[in-house]
Amino acid sequence: MTAHGEAPKPGGMRPRHELQSRPDGPSLALVRAQALLASLAPGGGVTPIAHGVDIVDTTVPVPMLNGLVLTAARHDRVGLDRALAAAAERLPAWSMQVVGHEPTGTERSAAAVRGLRELRFPTMIRPLADLPDEDGIMPSVTFRTVRTPEDRAAFVRALGESFGADASLGEPFVTNAVLAHPGITVYIAVVDGQVAATGITMLDDQGWLGVYSGGTIPAFRRRGLGRALLLHRLTEGRRAGAHTAYLQSSEMGRPLHEAVGFLDGDDDIIYFTH
C-alpha cells in the first residue's frame, strides 16, 4: 500500500517583498517562490535595488536560484552595471534573470560585458483539475513529509546523490523556517526502507503550485518512482487548493513532465550566467 503524506499546508506564501506580491503567470509565481525561499534562508534575503530590480540570495548553490532579478524592462545602464557588480560580489553562484519580457538591448549589453551567456528555460505548467489516479502507480513506495532530524538528513543525502552534489545543495530546503512555512512541503519517497527520491512543493496564495527538487538516486531510476512522486505532489497540492502547477525541466526530466501533462507555458525566464 502507498502511504500518502500530508497535503501541503494551506495558506500559501505571506508576501513580504514586491517580488512576492506581484500577480500573473507561472514565471512570476516562480520568482515569488524564489524570493520566499531567500527570505527564509539564514544569511539570504531579497535586496531591492530599483523598481523591478532585486538581488535574490537563497543560499542554494545553483545559479538559477540566485542573482539579479529583472521584472521591469527599463533600466539606467549605469545603474544596471552597478547592480550586476553587486550581485557578482555578493553571490558565489548567480545569474541575471529577465522575467516577463524579452531581454532589452541594455540588458543584453550589460550581460555581455560580464561574459554572461543567455539561457532560456521554459516554465512548464499543468492545470490540476484532472490528474491520473495515484492508486496502484507504484505500490511499494511510501511518501513522507520531512519533519524529523532523521528525515532532514535523509533528504539532504538523497538530493545530493541524485544530482552529484554535496550537502550544501539540500540543506537550505530543510531549515526550521522552511519546514514551518505553511506553503512549503518537503517530501521523501521511501522504497524498501531506503530514501530513494526527493521533492518539494511551494503553494502560493494565488493558487500556483511550484514543483522543485525532484531527484531520484541512481540505484532507483527507471522504475517509475519519479513519476509516482510527481503525481503524489500534484495530487496533494490540488487538495490544498492549487489550481495549476509549474516547474522548470531539464532535458532529462522533460519526457517525464510531458508524459504527466506539463506543457510549455509561453512564459519563459531568460537567464544570463557564466
Image (cartoon, grey):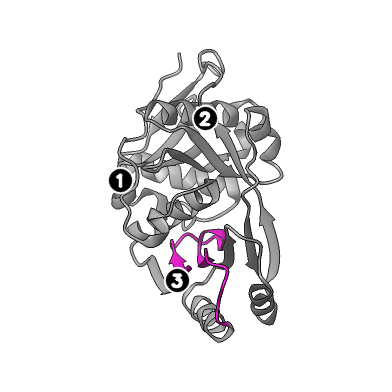
Residue 77 position in % (x across, y down): 59, 83
Callout 3 crowding tier (Cα within 10 Å): few <14, some 14–19, many ≥20 = few
Whether residue 62 is in magenta: the answer is: yes
Q: Nearer the viewer, mark 1 or mark 3?
A: 3
For residue 171, say whether it is visible: no
Badge 2 or badge 1: first in the primary sequence: 1
Q: Say which residue label 2 marks.
A: 229
Between residue 206 and residue 237, name the one nearer to us. 206
Residue 149 position in % (x across, y down): 31, 43
Q: Residue furthest front?
A: 74
Whether residue 11 is in magenta: the answer is: no
Q: How far apart, in angstroms, are the residues tagged by discs 1 and 3? A: 27 Å
Identity, as a three-letter code, of the amino acid under mark 2: Leu
Callout 1 crowding tier (Cα within 10 Å): few <14, some 14–19, many ≥20 = many
Helix, strand or loop under label 3: loop
Identity, as a three-letter code, of the amino acid under mark 3: His
Identified at 70% across, 65% down, the residue is 118
Identified at 52% across, 72% down, the residue is 92
Q: Say which residue label 1 marks.
A: 181
The total number of labels drawn is 3
Badge 1 or badge 3: first in the primary sequence: 3
Callout 2 crowding tier (Cα within 10 Å): few <14, some 14–19, many ≥20 = many
Identified at 42% across, 59% down, the residue is 19
Q: Nearer the viewer, mark 3 or mark 2?
A: 3
Helix, strand or loop under label 1: loop
Find the magenta span and give its range: 52-76
Q: Say which residue label 3 marks.
A: 51
